Image (cartoon, rainbow, N blue to C red):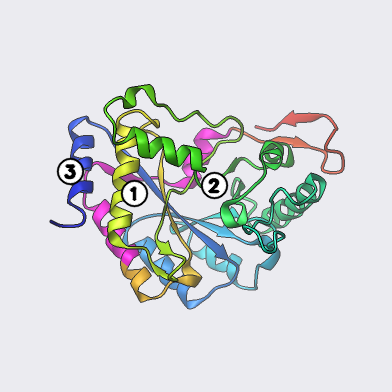
Amino acid sequence: MNLWDEARRELDAWADARLKARFWVRDDDAFEVSENLVRLRDVAAKFDTRIGLAIIPGKIAPGLCEFISDNPAQFYPMCHGWKHINYNSGKRPAEFGPDRPISNMISDAQFALRLFKEHFGTSKPIFVPPFNRITPALTKALPSIGFFGVSLMPNELERMLLRIGSCVPWNAAIRIPHFKGSPRIDVHVDLIDWSARTAQGARVVADQLVQHLRGRRLGIRSPHTPIGLLTHHLAHNEPVWRAVDDVLGFLRSHDAVEFIDVGEWINECAPGPIVADVGDQKGAVSRMG
């Protein structure tokens, strides 16, 4: 049996229900124009997909902004933390984790936003915390800092509910709670096996796709919630590039799949951030449209 057969049958069920499965791609850790970034641009063009490119504001090298500006159909810039520093030495890595004072994290997020807007002022900033970890306190503060949305990975509870709900007959009783706060667009399927530093196994990827598709079709998650694929162009070897081609090629081949433009998504979801005086987080706030 082909590795993608079950995923194809699940997508056929979406088509039978006259549903569209929404996908998007986020690529992390961009800061310079490299051969791999150029290759990623070519992948985006090949599959007619605008990739959300998570850029590290505090490390931006000369030439990157011009490269993004020259390729607007392939990349939507997103704000990837501040300097991608791990402050949790010896623990699960995080730049905006629980071991830092909230005032320090807010300050770093403000610096990141200022620099990000200097380079990519036409894009509504979406915050992508390095290592996909962020404290709830900072998540709540993001709109008042000036961010329009946030991109994370599902937490363990969400993953557990999806695993259970997508394979048991009483799934109608299971619903993943709606995220309250900033508009959120997550990634769900990592195409890299970080323990082996190579491509994630095709069987693992196919099974995860089925799980997320079925969970949305059954109503555990809204069927309109996009499924995010995660890549890291700087860490790609040839097996990873092949995996990216295989997954995107498979998804693009089915009529029940559509790839969303994250720029259009944030325009629809976020009319404007709550902007506070960055020097006084306790000051009055106003809504900007």
Q: Amino acid at mark 1?
A: Gln
Q: Secondary structure at mark 3?
A: helix
Q: Amino acid at mark 2?
A: Leu
Which residue is depicted at the point 51% across and 65% down? 70
Residue indicated by mark 1: 208
> Position of 281 compared to 208: left or right?
right
Say which quarter of the image contains residue 246: bottom left
Residue indicated by mark 2: 152
**Looking at the rendered structure, which numbered label has been put on residue 9?**
3
> Position of 72 compared to 6: left or right?
right
Q: Nearer the viewer, residue 56 or 124?
A: 56
Q: Which residues are magenta?
A: 243-270
Structural distance between the alpha carbons of marks 1 and 3: 14 Å
Q: Position of residue 242 (x, y in %)?
A: 31, 69
Q: Nearer the viewer, residue 218 or 77?
A: 218
Structural distance between the alpha carbons of marks 1 and 2: 17 Å
> Position of 223 compared to 137: left or right?
left
Which residue is depicted at the point 23% across and 47% down? 7
Which SS type dominates the magenta stretch? helix
Say which quarter of the image contains residue 29: bottom right
Q: Residue furthest top?
A: 173
